[in-house]
Amino acid sequence: MMRLFGLVFLVLSLCACNAKSEKENWYEISELLFEDSFNDGSLDNWISEIQEDSCSSVLVKDGKMDIDVCKGASIWLDQYFEGGVLIEYDATVIGKGGPNDRVSDLNCFWNATDPRSPKDLFDSPRKASGMFHDYDTLQLYYVGMGGHNNTKTRFRRYAGDGNKPLLARHDLSAPDVLIEANKTYRIQLIALDGRVQFIRDGAVIYDFKDAEAYEKGWFGIRTINNHMSVDNVKVYQIKGKDE
């Protein structure tokens, strides 16, 4: 009987593993579009929008992008992407007693465009102030991980007209979706054929189907009153398994 139970458990375990593998591999990588490991000490590929310069800095430190800001900031990759994309990077929120070492707000924008200037996010009527509400005029996907002093993780779809509804299932507060200080997370952002995912360390936190999908735009790191590092940024073109 025990041998039979063990065999059944093994079969069920293998089935569960296969199901997980299939879910994680619903797309395939076509091409590496961009990568930056910051080893050359340059931020030439990035555009910073900072609310307050006097107590903030964005620079390369110890081979990583170091974001140390006292107020709001968005750091945009200056490249425009179309079609299915996978964006991935390492991010660490630093909590070591520094003036901006607040463990909160490891946030991001992706597939961002301004409907008034869809081909150039940086030549549009929008305000590039670094203040959070000034991004309400954009169309984009947003995740705020560990927001509200590390009590909330949220996903929103910005409509570009100030409308950015928060669905109940996208308003999370469990400890396993919040931030641990000084821990490096591997973040993955996916947008392909109307399916949008946010993945952290291999765990799918958000899996959203968008009937009016955003299929092009820019990617940016977003935070406020925070100190973090970013490294090993890669952007891939992806396609569905059946294409």
Image (cartoon, rainbow, N blue to C red):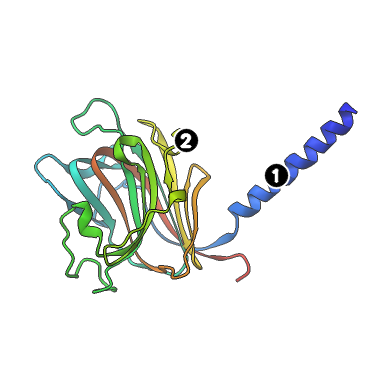
Q: How crowded is mark 1: few (under 14 residues within 10 Å), some or many (20 or more)?
A: few
Would you place residue 178 above or below residue 34 in this image?
above
Question: Among all residues in the image, which is located at the extreme left?
Answer: 54
Q: The disc labelled 1 sits on which kind of residue?
A: Ala
**Snapshot quadrant of residue 65:** top left
Q: Residue at x 31, y 42 (%)?
A: 105
Q: Position of residue 88 (x, y in %)?
A: 43, 51
State which quarter of the image contains the C terminus. Answer: bottom right
Q: Position of residue 66 (x, y in %)?
A: 26, 41
Asked if the residue at tag 2 contacts the one at tag 1, i.e. Cβ–Cβ closer than 8 Å, the answer is no
State which quarter of the image contains the N terminus. Answer: top right
Q: Where is residue 228 in the image (x, y as percent from the top left)?
A: 29, 39
Q: Residue at x 21, y 34 (%)?
A: 100
Would you place residue 170 above or below residue 140 in this image?
above
Q: Which residue position holds label 1?
A: 16
Residue 8 vs residue 68, the one in the foreground:
8
Q: Is residue 50 left or right of residue 90?
A: left
Secondary structure beneath disc 1?
helix
Residue 186 vs residue 125, the one in the foreground:
125
Question: Among all residues in the image, which is located at the extreme right?
Answer: 1
Residue 2 vs residue 162, the one in the foreground:
162
Q: Which residue is drawn at 18% across and 52% down?
A: 131
Q: The disc labelled 2 sits on which kind of residue?
A: Asp
Q: Which residue is drawn at 26% across and 33% down?
A: 102
Would you place residue 219 above or below residue 185 in this image?
below
Question: Among all residues in the image, which is located at the extreme front?
Answer: 168
Q: Residue 176 carries which label?
A: 2
Q: How far apart are marks 1 and 2 (CA)?
A: 21 Å
Q: Where is residue 126 in the image (x, y as percent from the top left)?
A: 18, 65
Q: In this view, does 116 lie to the left or right of 92?
A: left
Tell me if I can see residue 63 in this picture: no
Secondary structure beneath disc 2?
helix
